Image (tube, rainbow, N blue to C red):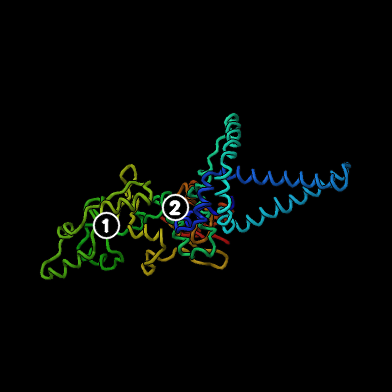
């Protein structure tokens, strides 16, 4: 009963005969228990009877002799028949289960009529009291249990692999807002700017795609791949670049509703052959953007650390850390091993504003989840930097 069922199934698939027999026995737990307890109780009862007969034969039918024989038998049964074998079996469950299955399997076949007869009464009793038995479902595991198994796997899984597995399990819970780049940090060019300003901004841009906004308003016209623009400039050196050319090179924006899980979004990216999506709320307002790279980094960790946007926004201080208010709570929990709530606001700035219900002044200290925070600076209706004390 203590054997690892998943390990047993693995050995059975590899062709281990003992594991296959043990799996078949465990699939009929009621019959397995019946044959074990039938033989066990028969041996215990027979040994008690034998001791009584021997004691009476040699020492007579005195009550003291019978009582002493009973106590000695009980002690020996507990030590050698019950406790010691079970402790040994629990400590070496897999090894003994594979060997014992060669004995128990044929024993079950031989004693099946008796086992069936006994189980007839047992199942009838359970039915009277409306007690349901679902042995196989007891060994199904939930996502949270799977996370615990992976976390406690110790040296069997490398630390990096363990992190990737845990991140994959969380894909159905984490939404795109948790990892998006908020609109306040998204760089863009406006078609109303002159060409020198546009080219200067593109030349200093660190990503492959940049947003293009309309001349007269802030609505998004499209997404420009900088490589397309550079290729055009190389092929058409003599032609003058204009706004219409930039428009023609831009791709249509791909919009994503907020609340979409990362698991669904990675499928949408695959189905639509897209690598960048613009997140909008129920009113159609632009909230931020997410790329396929962002999702991959959520699974395997950051791999473009040389980019300014990828630099860590957590700085170590003497008695704590100085962090950017725009950092997401999930990232903060990961980096500093905190336990800040992630069900409400997505960023540290949002959490602080929700806590105070206003923009706090600099040098304001407060406590959330037994951690002391201090607002260092705030600007443009947001908390810019925060210190978290050890």
Between marks 2 and 1 in the image, the one whose residue lies nearer the viewer: 2
Alpha-carbon distance for marks 2 and 1?
30 Å
First in sequence, mark 2 or 1: give its number: 2
**Residue 305 quadrant:** bottom left
Q: Is mark 1 on a helix, strand or loop?
A: strand
Task: Look at mark 1 in the image and give the residue it sits on.
Answer: 211
**Residue 308 quadrant:** bottom left
Q: Where is residue 129 in the image (x, y as percent from the top left)?
A: 60, 30
Q: Residue at x 18, y 57 (%)?
A: 247
Q: Where is residue 63 in the image (x, y as percent from the top left)?
A: 88, 41
Q: Position of residue 261 (x, y in %)?
A: 38, 49
Q: Nearer the viewer, residue 269 or 53?
A: 53
Quick one: label 1, few (<14), some, or many (20+) residues within 10 Å? many
Task: Look at mark 2 in the image and give the residue it sits on.
Answer: 170
Q: Nearer the viewer, residue 347 or 150?
A: 150
Q: Quadrant of the C terminus?
A: bottom right
Asked whether residue 317 is in view, the answer is yes
């Amino acid at each position: 009963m203590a054997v690892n069922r998943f390990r047993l199934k693995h050995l059975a698939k590899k062709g281990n005969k003992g594991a296959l027999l043990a799996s078949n026995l465990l699939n009929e737990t009621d019959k397995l228990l019946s044959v074990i307890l039938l033989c066990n109780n028969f041996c215990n009862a027979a040994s008690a009877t034998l001791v009584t007969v021997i004691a009476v034969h040699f020492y007579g039918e005195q009550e003291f002799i019978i009582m002493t024989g009973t106590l000695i038998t009980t002690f020996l049964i507990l030590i050698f028949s019950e406790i010691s074998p079970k402790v040994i079996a629990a400590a070496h469950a897999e090894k003994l289960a594979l060997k014992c299955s060669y004995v128990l399997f044929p024993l079950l076949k031989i004693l099946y009529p008796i086992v069936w007869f006994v189980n007839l009464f047992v199942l009838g009793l359970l039915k009277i009291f409306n007690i349901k038995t679902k042995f196989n479902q007891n060994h199904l595991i939930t996502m949270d249990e799977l996370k615990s198994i992976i976390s406690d796997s110790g040296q069997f899984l490398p630390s990096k692999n363990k992190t990737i597995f845990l991140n994959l399990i969380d894909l159905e819970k984490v939404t795109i807002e948790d990892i998006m780049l908020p609109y306040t940090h998204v760089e863009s060019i406006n078609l109303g700017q002159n060409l020198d300003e546009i080219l200067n901004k593109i030349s200093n841009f660190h990503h492959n795609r940049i947003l293009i906004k309309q001349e007269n308003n802030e609505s998004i016209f499209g997404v420009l791949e900088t490589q397309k623009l550079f290729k055009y400039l190389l092929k058409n050196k003599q032609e003058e670049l204009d706004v219409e050319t930039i428009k023609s090179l831009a791709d249509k924006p791909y919009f994503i509703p907020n609340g979409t899980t990362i698991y669904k979004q990675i499928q949408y990216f695959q189905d639509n052959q897209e690598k960048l999506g613009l997140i909008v709320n129920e009113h159609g307002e632009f909230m931020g953007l997410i790329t396929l790279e962002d999702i991959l980094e959520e699974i395997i960790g950051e791999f473009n650390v040389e980019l300014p946007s990828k630099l860590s926004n957590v700085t170590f201080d003497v008695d704590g850390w100085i962090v950017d208010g725009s950092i997401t709570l999930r990232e903060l929990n990961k980096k500093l091993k905190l336990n800040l709530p992630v069900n409400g606001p997505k960023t540290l700035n949002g959490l602080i504003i929700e806590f105070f219900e206003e923009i706090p002044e600099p040098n304001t200290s407060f406590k959330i989840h037994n951690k002391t925070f201090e607002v260092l600076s705030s600007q443009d209706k947001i908390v810019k930097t925060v210190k978290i004390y050890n």
